[in-house]
Image (cartoon, rainbow, N blue to C red):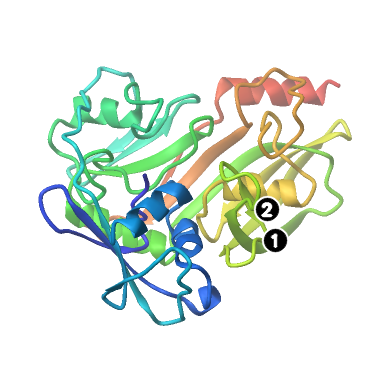
Amino acid sequence: MMIPMDDDLTKASDQEQIIELLVDEEYDKLRIDKYLATQLDDMSRSYIQKLIGEDRVLVDGKAVKSNFRVLSGQSVTLSLPELKEAQIAPEDIPVDIIYEDSDIIVINKHKGLVVHPAPGHESGTLVNALLYHCKDNLSGINGVLRPGIVHRIDRDTTGVLVACKNDTAHRYIAEQLKAHSITRRYQAIVYNAFKTDSGRVETTIGRHPRDRKKMAAGVINGRKAATNYKLLENLSGKYAYVECELETGRTHQIRVHLSSINHPILGDTVYGPDKNPFHLEGQALHAGVLGLIHPRTKEYMEFSAPLPVYFTDLLTKLRKL
């Protein structure tokens, strides 16, 4: 389950965790279970309802039922049950380290690498690799399942990701993510040629109303999201190579936004066509550039990762069509 870094999270004991939220005006009069589902992207609504039934969700200090409707300005407190002792083993998994110091480690994540343990992916993750490489030098704010993890990219998205080695660095970078001040530029290969050189997509993004495993644009009571895109090259009249810069960082944001303007990413069978004509392993999306203020030196640093081989090979193939 996700403990979102946008929220004030404190530890009630060594393992029990408290999430505190302040209801924004855009969520006024929304059911409490739906509200929490919009805020906690990796927590299922059925699990949220279970927590509500156990009186682990308080609104202004009082337990509520699932059909309770929140009001703007109310305080919502969620108490997560104590986690069982996590059996996350350090694993000698090769990782491509772009930069490392005593506060942060910047990784070029390869395709297929899951960032942190989750049901179905209890081992072989980036967290397992970081535990091996960094030993005990990882931040603990995100709990025992996500040491060092301050943000994520999807399993099949490649590119730059930063992890934190201590809680001070974690808080500092989390604040930049919350303020949307971090530079994040992605490259993607999408369906359909573009008629304009650049543009901006601004919508809400929230859980799909019928498929809870997916996100969707334009969802009522979803969270505001904005993506700027720039055409790099139209390819054979049927595809395009684009760069996207995030203003916000919602779950699957680029994938959802590009699909919403009829340019789904090649290989993305969740938000695009079911057919995968080039037999790609997931979406052709690469986190090329990450820029942030360093938590200790307070200097701006920018990191980049070259396009992976599968991506450049695909570009070459599409140019020849």
Q: Is residue 3 left or right of residue 132?
A: right
Residue shown at the point (53%, 77%) measured from the top left: 29
Residue 197 x %, y % = 78, 53
Marker disc for residue 200: 1
For residue 164, what is the image quadrant? top left
Mark 2, residues whose alpha carbon is within 10 Å: few (<14), some, or many (≥20)?
many
For residue 163, what is the image quadrant? top left
Q: Is residue 232 above or below residue 71?
A: above
Foreground: 50 or 265?
Answer: 50
Is residue 300 something that shows in the picture?
Answer: no
**Mark 1 residue type:** Arg
Residue 233 x %, y % = 77, 40
Q: Are marks 1 and 2 in contact (CB under 8 Å)?
A: yes
Marker disc for residue 47: none
Element assignment for label 2? strand
Q: Is residue 49 above or below residue 107?
A: below
**Mark 2 residue type:** Tyr
Is residue 265 something that shows in the picture?
Answer: yes
Foreground: 143 or 127?
Answer: 143
Residue shown at the point (83%, 20%) measured from the top left: 320
Residue shown at the point (74%, 51%) measured from the top left: 260
> The N terminus lies in which quarter of the figure?
top left
Q: How many marks?
A: 2
Element assignment for label 1? strand
Residue 91 x %, y % = 25, 19
Q: Is residue 183 above or below residue 318?
A: below
Marker disc for residue 229: 2
Residue shown at the point (63%, 31%) measured from the top left: 284
Going from the N terminus, do you reach mark 1 or mark 2 first?
A: 1
Residue 214 x %, y % = 60, 44
